[in-house]
């Protein structure tokens, strides 16, 4: 990976569709690097001037909102037991945790789950399966998607503005920071889940 290659990617017509696909895929598969992609494109927007930061935020927010809404629809239509991976003890524990939290603080949980890679899938599926009213869900999920896109893109932009060394350094450091924050939030959530299930 070189500065020239990253500059070419940033200015390419496939840049924003690629970003959309990665963020959309991240809503379903936590191994897809949605956060890292938005942060990287935020860094490229500052270090190379393309794609525009506003476009990065807009595309990321739309993709995140669409992905979360699709997960909500899956939960509403399919439920939480249809496929084998859903019936695993660990997954069912995550669903139970999400259901309890959604019952207590619906808007807060929907909003914060968007920022936690391994929590958003469970929360969105449970929201659909629980028949949370679609207008309420979409309003909160849409706001969360926009806030998430702004945060991820501005994180990358800030790293690129602070660090010298060109696009490669900016992208690499911003991705490491984004992944580290995501893993840290997930670890905190997992600890909280364990404490809430202890007698």
Image (cartoon, rainbow, N blue to C red):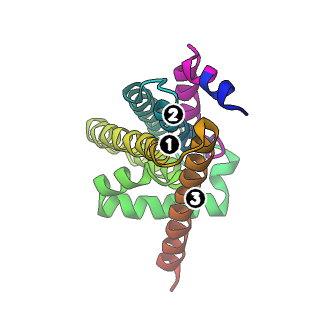
Task: Residue under label 2, please give it.
Answer: 47
- First along the sequence among labels 2 and 1: 2
Boundaries of the magenta span? 8-32
**Residue 42 lies in magenta, yes or no?**
no
Mark 1 surroundings: few (<14), some (14-19) or many (≥20) residues within 10 A:
many
Residue 160 badge: 1
Q: Closest to the observer: 159 or 148?
A: 159
Question: Quarter of the image holding residue 99?
Answer: bottom left
> Which residue shows up at 58% across the image and 16% down it?
12
Q: Is residue 17 on the magenta stretch?
A: yes
> From the viewer's perspective, is the residue at label 2 or at label 3 nearer?
2
Q: CA distance from mark 2 to mark 3?
A: 22 Å
Q: Position of residue 143 (x, y in %)?
A: 30, 40
Q: Determine whether label 2 and label 1 are within 8 Å by CB.
A: yes
At mark 3, the secondary structure is helix
Residue found at the far top of this picture? 13
| Helix, strand or loop under label 1 | helix
């Amino acid at each position: 990976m070189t500065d020239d290659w990253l500059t070419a990617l940033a200015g390419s017509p496939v840049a924003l569709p690629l970003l959309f696909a990665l963020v959309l895929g991240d809503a379903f598969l936590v191994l897809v690097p949605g956060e890292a992609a938005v942060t990287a494109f935020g860094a490229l927007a500052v270090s190379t001037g393309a794609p525009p930061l506003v476009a990065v935020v807009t595309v990321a927010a739309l993709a995140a909102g669409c992905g979360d809404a699709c997960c909500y629809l899956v939960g509403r239509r399919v439920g939480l037991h249809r496929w084998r991976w859903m019936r695993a003890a660990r997954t069912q524990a995550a669903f139970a945790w999400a259901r309890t939290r959604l019952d207590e603080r619906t808007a807060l949980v929907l909003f914060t789950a968007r920022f936690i890679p391994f929590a958003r899938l469970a929360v969105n599926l449970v929201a659909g399966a629980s028949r949370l009213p679609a207008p309420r869900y979409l309003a909160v999920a849409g706001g969360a998607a926009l806030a998430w896109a702004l945060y991820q893109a501005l994180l990358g932009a800030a790293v690129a503005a602070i660090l010298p060394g060109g696009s490669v350094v900016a992208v690499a450091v911003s991705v490491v920071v984004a992944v580290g924050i995501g893993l840290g939030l997930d670890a905190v959530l997992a600890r909280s889940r364990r404490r809430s299930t202890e007698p």
